[in-house]
Amino acid sequence: MTDGIVPGLSERQERLVTRTMQLALGGLSAYGLVTLQFGMAANGGVALAVTLFPALLSREYDYTMAPALVLWLTVAVFLHSIGSLGPYRWFSWYDEIAHTVSASVIAGLGYASFRALERHSEDIEVPPGFRGVFIVVFVLAAGVVWELLEFGSGRLASALGADAPLVVMGIDDIVTDFLFNAVGAVFVALAGTDAVGGLVGFFRRRLRASDGD
């Protein structure tokens, strides 16, 4: 995850790719509504809302997230939404890629929050080696929450007679999810923490602002 230019793409191209995926997610949600496939509609709608979160930060807090980070976030939710249309079932490797990408995003957000809190408080001093451990543990904990959401959405959809937006594929799938969540977390811990420096600064400023309220 890079807080700048994705290799081979200009910032303008990064924004264009992001907008294209957002349009696809909006189309997916609209199609689900028209065809009364409410699980599909919810899947696309929630994913689209997540991709619009950086725009909300810009409007409310005057913070402009790097186009590459916005693109990476969008790719993560896009892979999961499109996967529910069939790729999860068609390709055994698709789920692994989707979870690795999304885990790297979660790892970056978790690290940025943790590092901002560390810099903000004089009472918190964490050895550099422990920060990588924190990233992995944070992502695995987020993975537990995600699996619970998948299970809960499946039970709720079954009770309502609707398609579940999130589906649990079985114990083997859960174990594989956690394995590749860890892969994404380790990648960020080893090579990606500098990439979210801008996000660390933003979180730190928000902490300072909250202290002043």
Image: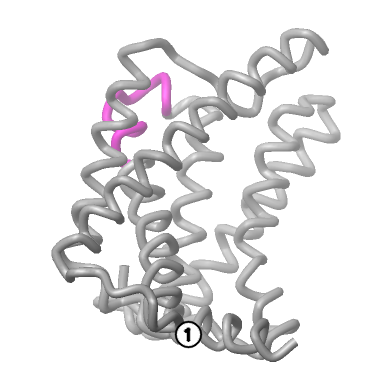
| Residue visible at 35% across and 39% down in the picture | 140
In this rendering, the answer to whether 7 lies above or below 191 is below
Quarter holding the N terminus is: bottom left
Q: Main secondary structure of the magenta part?
A: helix
The range drawn in magenta is 88-97
The residue at which mark 1 appears reads as 12
In magenta stretch: residue 178: no
Please name whichever residue, 2 or 212, is drawn nearer the observer in this view of the structure. 212
Q: How is the image coloured?
A: one colour
Quarter holding the C terminus is: bottom right
| Residue visible at 21% across and 44% down in the picture | 183
Residue 60's x, y, as percent? 74, 82
Q: Amino acid at mark 1?
A: Arg
| Residue visible at 36% across and 73% down in the picture | 124
Q: Is residue 112 left or right of residue 182?
A: right
| Residue visible at 20% across and 52% down in the picture | 186
Residue 68's x, y, as percent? 41, 75
Callout 1: 10 Å neighbours few (<14), some, many (20+)? few
In magenta stretch: residue 90: yes
Q: Is residue 77 left or right of residue 36?
A: left
Residue 115's x, y, as percent? 37, 73
SS under mark 1: helix
Q: Residue furthest front?
A: 123
Whether residue 13 appears in this view of the structure is no
Q: Is residue 160 left or right of residue 201?
A: right
Whether residue 57 appears in this view of the structure is yes
In this rendering, the answer to whether 15 lies above or below 137 is below
